């Protein structure tokens, strides 16, 4: 593959105005698939969740998942969309082994939700409104693994198909053209996808794990020469599956297209593939006959006509919009922008909020969740929220604040809690980790340590207070760490003076 | 009603990945034209005030509860596979259409 010429980004923006569009696919976290009772599970054994309906075998008859419709309507409402009075499914016909039905059940002329808008905020504080054209229900396709030298289809000798994902409910959210993003275009893309991800998570309609493909983005990019009002030819970069990649892919396409246009070339309307490893896109198939899907209304399914009462009932279940919630929490917690970002980027807003509700101070809750708990989660390849409950973290914070545990002991207690040994107090009890707060026991250990190191004692008496460190260390060791070092220091200086 | 051309049938066959010989193309073009003509008779009774419909029965909102129903075993699912490898269907790669 020849390496594409790229124009310097700033120069590209001087010469051209980027115009964007996004199609985001959200996998819903229903228990079952869109049109059959097969389990909607990630990571089960290949082809263990199939039936005649999702495989398109004779006799299969699709039936619409009520929960999936409900989730789609709630998502549509959260996007500010209108919900159609009547909405129907259509067959999108194509012949490719990721579906054995030879069509994808989707929606075409009557999507469930239409005409919404979301406002995203960039790091500079700039706010950009993205208009939503539609959000429609459809089913996911099976998963292909290309085997051969490259792992990509070029050069593949054959492909393996797992139909577990085939039929999993999706909502596809399509934006209108986004103009005026200018040099912020890559960040607008990232912020938009982040917004959708956050929204579906807050709604609880998707697991929203981009690394598992729950939220996938196709990015459309075209360039309009400055001073022209004619839209450029667009490319569609498929399956950009991380927030950072959305930003990189948009930037790359702007630079690539600018170089071609500036050299007098033309852009081919085509789908392009994003390569995470090299940070580049490469040409896929041209947009042509292959996009002739011969849509027609799905004869096996009747229309979905949500009553206005149902829609209003669902509207009442919408959570606080994520951006408003963030502003409210930041204010309430009194965090700096950086501290708050730490919590938000670590997906820890829920955890910190719940821990504060259990009585911990926001600062302590933040410290534990973004610190030790995240560190252990990282080391174990888990998410922080599944390791320990907010109630237990709050209890741990209280033990430290009451002086029952030092930070170091608290970390050991946390480990016990994570390993399922019970609540923090139970772990303290079982492991005997409580701070020795009995001054008598400390003084005995201090006197012993001072007697063992007469030279240190002399130094302290001569005013070299920092020499006390050696004695404090010995005492902490004797107490197996279960003492408050500050208190030990106080007592050492007291005893040395006598 | 527009006639069905051999070119249209060729295009449809390409979309459906069906390789047609010239003889098949000729006979299918004639047969398809007949089918389209027959179906077109419906248009004669469908005046503009009759709304388009995809269903004979006016019915909406037929839903299924979101509850798992046992489906096929892996062996059953793969029993019709032209080729398999482990628990996967094995297929020839189709160039230029990476999904
Ligand atoms: Zn199924």
Image (spheres, coloured by chain):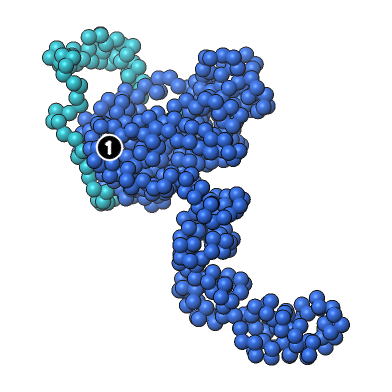
Chain colours: A blue, B cyan
Q: Is residue A152 above or below residue A427?
A: above
- Quadrant of the frame with the N terminus of chain B: top left
Find residue B55 and report its horizontal and vertical position in percent.
Answer: 17, 28
Find residue A320 and report its horizontal and vertical position in percent.
Answer: 41, 47
Left or right: A399 as drawn, with respect to A106: right
Given residues A98 and A190, the one toward you in this image is A190
Q: Is residue A97 visible?
A: no
Left or right: A358 as drawn, with respect to B84: right
Q: Is mark 1 within 8 Å of ligand 1?
A: no
Chain at numbered mark 1: A
**Res. A108 image quadrant:** top left
Q: Is residue B93 above or below residue A470?
A: above
Total number of numbered labels?
A: 1
Q: Is residue A114 visible?
A: yes
Q: Residues within 10 Å of mark 1 (few under 14, many from 20)?
A: some
- Quadrant of the frame with the C terminus of chain B: top left
Q: Which residue appears at 51% of the width and 65% of the height? A: A360
Q: Which residue is mark 1?
A: A56
Left or right: A102 as drawn, with respect to A468: left
Q: Which residue appears at 30% of the width and 15% of the height? A: B9
Find residue A46 and report its horizontal and vertical position in percent.
Answer: 38, 48
Find residue A370 and report its horizontal and vertical position in percent.
Answer: 57, 58
Q: Is residue A183 above or below residue A288?
A: below
């Amino acid at each position: 593959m020849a390496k594409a010429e790229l124009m310097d980004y700033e120069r590209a923006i001087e010469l051209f105005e980027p115009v964007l569009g996004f199609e985001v696919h959200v996998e819903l976290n229903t228990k079952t698939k869109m049109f059959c009772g097969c389990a909607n599970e990630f990571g089960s054994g290949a082809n263990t969740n199939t039936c005649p309906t999702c495989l398109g075998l004779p006799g299969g008859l699709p039936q619409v998942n009520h929960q999936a419709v409900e989730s789609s309507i709630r998502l549509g409402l959260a996007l500010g969309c209108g919900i159609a009075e009547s909405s129907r499914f259509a067959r999108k016909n194509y012949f490719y082994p990721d579906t054995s039905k030879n069509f994808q059940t989707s929606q075409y002329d009557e999507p469930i939700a239409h005409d919404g808008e979301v406002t995203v905020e960039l790091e500079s504080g700039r706010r950009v409104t993205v208009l939503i054209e539609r959000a429609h229900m459809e089913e996911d396709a099976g998963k292909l693994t290309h085997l051969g030298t490259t792992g990509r289809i070029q050069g593949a000798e054959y492909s393996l198909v797992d139909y577990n994902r085939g039929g999993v409910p999706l909502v596809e959210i399509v934006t209108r053209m986004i103009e005026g993003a200018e040099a912020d275009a890559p960040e607008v893309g990232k912020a938009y996808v982040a917004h959708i991800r956050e929204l579906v998570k807050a709604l609880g309609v998707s697991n929203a794990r981009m690394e598992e493909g729950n939220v996938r983005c196709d990015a459309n990019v075209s360039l309009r020469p400055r001073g022209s009002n004619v839209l450029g030819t667009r490319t569609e970069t498929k399956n950009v599956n991380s927030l950072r990649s959305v930003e990189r892919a948009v930037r790359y396409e702007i630079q690539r297209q600018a170089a071609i246009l500036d050299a007098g070339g033309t852009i081919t309307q085509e789908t392009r593939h994003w390569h995470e490893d090299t940070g580049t896109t490469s040409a896929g198939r041209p947009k042509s006959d292959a996009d002739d899907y011969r849509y027609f209304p799905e004869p096996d399914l009747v229309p979905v006509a949500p009553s206005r009462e149902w829609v209003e009932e669902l509207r009442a279940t919408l959570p606080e919009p994520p951006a408003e919630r963030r502003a409210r929490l930041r204010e309430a917690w009194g965090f700096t922008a950086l501290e708050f970002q730490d919590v938000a980027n670590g997906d820890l807003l829920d955890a910190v909020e719940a821990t504060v509700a259990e009585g911990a101070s926001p600062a302590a809750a933040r410290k534990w969740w973004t610190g030790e708990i995240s560190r252990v989660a990282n080391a174990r390849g888990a998410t922080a929220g599944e390791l320990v409950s907010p109630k237990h973290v709050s209890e741990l914070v209280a033990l430290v604040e009451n002086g029952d545990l030092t930070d170091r002991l608290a970390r050991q207690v946390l480990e016990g809690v994570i390993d399922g040994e019970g609540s923090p107090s139970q772990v303290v009890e079982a492991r005997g980790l409580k701070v020795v707060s009995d001054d008598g026991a400390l003084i005995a250990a201090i006197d012993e340590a001072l007697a063992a190191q007469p030279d240190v004692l002399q130094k302290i008496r001569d005013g070299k207070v920092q020499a006390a460190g050696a004695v404090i260390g010995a005492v902490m060791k004797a107490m197996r760490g279960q003492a408050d070092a500050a208190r030990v220091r106080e007592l050492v200086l007291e005893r040395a003076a006598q | 009603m527009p006639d069905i051309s051999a070119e249209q049938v060729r295009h449809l066959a390409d979309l459906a990945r069906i390789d047609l010989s010239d003889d098949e193309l000729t006979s299918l073009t004639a047969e398809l034209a007949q089918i389209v003509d027959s179906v077109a008779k419906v248009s004669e009774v469908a005046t503009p005030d009759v709304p388009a419909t995809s269903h004979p029965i006016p019915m909406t909102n037929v839903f299924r509860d979101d509850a798992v129903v046992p489906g096929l075993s892996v062996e059953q699912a793969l029993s019709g596979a032209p080729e398999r490898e482990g628990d996967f269907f094995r297929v020839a790669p189709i160039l230029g259409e990476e999904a």
